[in-house]
Amino acid sequence: MIRTLFEDILVALSLLTRIPLKVPAHAYNRMDKAVWAYVFAGIIWGFSTWTITFAFAYFGLPVSIASALGLSAGIIATGAMHEDGLADSADGILGSWNRSRRLEIMKDSFLGAYGVLAIVLSTIIRWQLIFALFANSYALVILIIAGCLSRSVLPIIMAMLNHAREEGLSHSVGRPSGPSVYISLSMTILFAFFTLKIEGLMLCFIAVLLAFACAKVAQRTIHGQTGDILGATAIFTETGVLIASIILLK
């Protein structure tokens, strides 16, 4: 049992980060069950972002620059896969009114104006939010909660929506069901409550609302979800939680 859980964590990290891990081949047979471990990818994003920011600020670099380096570390650790999904989703959803054409745009390797703007704006906004967070003693906790929430809502979206296409990373993972869908979010809610009390629960509520909003848009525009949609959902949720944390914990 413990070995299976550990292998689930390895599978989740191999999918949502770029950490070089040796994952047994048979462990990928549980990709739809391993979604419970997505929370660990969020921990890695939050901790790596905070650690690099804190380290450079501690050695005298201005916090504004240190936070840019911290965000860069988080993006590198996760392979920019969510940013890529955000860009492809922006190009596809905003670039056409036709479902099939939207999916075609999302699949191609070219980056359009909408995608470029989505990446640039989301990166600048998160950089400034992280910069502002470091005036708060809860910076590490908030970054971990934001990272965890933005990954923990993904299994719920995967369970709610059909696959928009019969291929791709999300389709290869499968459609999760049962308790594994909610374990990651439940763990994050408990952590948020014990660290930030009622404000932590409010952040969780906001994250779920944002994820459902993304799911609604995806269902309306492409009639389902893809890996790109999940990436975009992660970025939207992460950004929304960071914004809300600054408002609630100022």
Image (cartoon, helix red, strand yellow):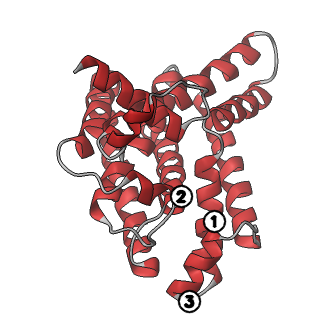
Q: How far apart are marks 2 and 1 (CA)?
A: 9 Å
Left or right: where 170 falls relative to 81 = left
Q: Which residue is drawn at 40% across and 80% down?
A: 220
Q: Which residue is drawn at 45% across and 72% down?
A: 165
Is there a contact, CB below 8 Å, between mark 3 and mark 2? no
Q: What residue type is labelled 3?
A: Trp
Mark 1: secondary structure: helix
Q: How far apart are marks 1 and 3 (CA)?
A: 15 Å
Q: Which amino acid does label 2 sit on?
A: Ala
Percent x, y of residue 24: 44, 28
Q: Which residue is drawn at 80% across and 23% down?
A: 62
Give the label on residue 229, or none: none
Give the label on residue 88, or none: 1
Give the label on residue 97, or none: 3
Q: How crowded is mark 2: few (under 14 residues within 10 Å), some or many (20 or more)?
A: many
The quadrant of the rendering that contains the N terminus is top left
Mark 2: secondary structure: helix
Q: Which quadrant holds residue 31?
A: top left
Q: What residue type is labelled 1?
A: Asp
Reply above or below: 170 against 96: above
Left or right: where 187 falls relative to 206 = left
Percent x, y of residue 245: 46, 38
- Which of 230/173 is in front? 173
Q: Which of marks 1 and 3 is nearer the N terminus?
A: 1
The furthest residue to the front: 26
Is there a contact, CB below 8 Å, between mark 2 and mark 1? no
Mark 3: secondary structure: loop
Percent x, y of residue 193: 27, 29
What residue is shown with label 2? Answer: 232
